[in-house]
Image (cartoon, grey):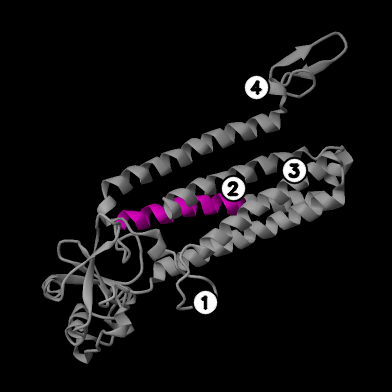
Amino acid sequence: MEATVTTANNEEKTWGGGDIQPLGASYGKMMMWFFIVSDALTFSGFLAAYGFSRFKFIETWPLADEVFTHFPFMHGVSAPMYYVALMTFILIFSSVTMVLAVDAGHQLKKTKVAIYMFLTIIGGIIFVGSQAWEWKNFIKGEYGAVETKGGSLLQFVDKEGKRVALEEFAVKLPEQRVALTRAEGKWFMEDAESTPTYSVAEIQAGFKAHPDLLIRTEHLTAKKKKTVLSRAESESRLNDAKYVVEGANLTRNEYGSKLFADFFFFITGFHGFHVFSGIIINIIIFFNVLLGTYEKRRSYEMVEKVGLYWHFVDLVWVFVFTVFYLV
């Protein structure tokens, strides 16, 4: 319930503005700050959990420079972190346009508010689309690997230490693959959809046929490089192979520790949901600006409030970007 202050001439709500404004802020701004603080604590908990897990499994943690190497329309070209840096710049630039929208609102310039709000929305859409594209590449994978019976991950490299994709050396063994039909049952068909492109036997046969190949383990050396085994050690370790891993999901991860994929999907997905929500809110505010709703009120405080949320989302991404991609 809202408390009221009653005088002989008027009745005023305590949280209704006027002379009673905690910290000089309106009720709406105060509630937005409360939400931002609580959400900041949530993200802090997620990132702290990620940090503890990473240092616990530091020897098998994937290297960001080897995971995020894709750039649109540049298939096969290694561009480590380039696209992530670009999408980060776009999101930060959208904060600049939001600041300009808020400033234009203070000056009651409707047209400028609409233009800068539109640019902010476009920046947010590009960022969310870029994040979805990053997810697609992360899930699909690029090189593939095998997992041993003990849960270790084995990747393939040439004598220079460059990664080699499974498709470059694996052989096809027809007797290893069985054609399935819908008549064999729904559960069988669902299992077939998750079947990797190659079987363990096909990988082993292809590896034996290419004596220039070596195996690289997920363990890091003192120089923060993956450990490359000798040919004899590689053949010995490959005999323990149990699964073929292509890409990353919540069960297996061709890049290294499974926890990395779990945290990546959860934290970047949670942040992406925040950005998507901000885009929807910005669109609503944008149409209200076009309709002249705030012009009639002679106040663009709603633009300022949604701006606080947008700046918070951008700031959180700076921390996510630092933790996942830079550190």
Label ID, residue 43: none
Label 3 close to label 4 by CB (< 8 Å)? no
* Left or right: 110 as drawn, with respect to 129: right
Q: Main secondary structure of the magenta part?
A: helix
Mark 3–mark 1 Cα distance, whole angstroms, equals: 38 Å
Q: Residues within 10 Å of mark 1 (few under 14, many from 20)?
A: few
Q: Where's residue 191, x and y in %?
A: 29, 73
Query: Which numbered mark, 3 or 1, is in the foreground of this view?
Result: 1
* Count of all numbered marks drawn on residues in the image: 4
- The residue at which mark 2 appears reads as 314
SS under mark 1: loop
> What amino acid does circle 4 point to?
Met
- The residue at which mark 1 appears reads as 74
Mark 2–mark 4 Cα distance, whole angstroms, equals: 34 Å
Dot 3 or dot 4, earlier in sequence: 4
Label 2 close to label 4 by CB (< 8 Å)? no
SS under mark 2: helix
- The residue at which mark 3 appears reads as 303
Q: Quadrant of residue 177?
A: bottom left
Query: Which numbered mark, 4 or 1, is in the foreground of this view?
Result: 1
* Left or right: 203 as drawn, with respect to 130: left
Q: Which residues are magenta?
A: 258-277
Residue drawn at 48 percent across, 65 percent down: 134
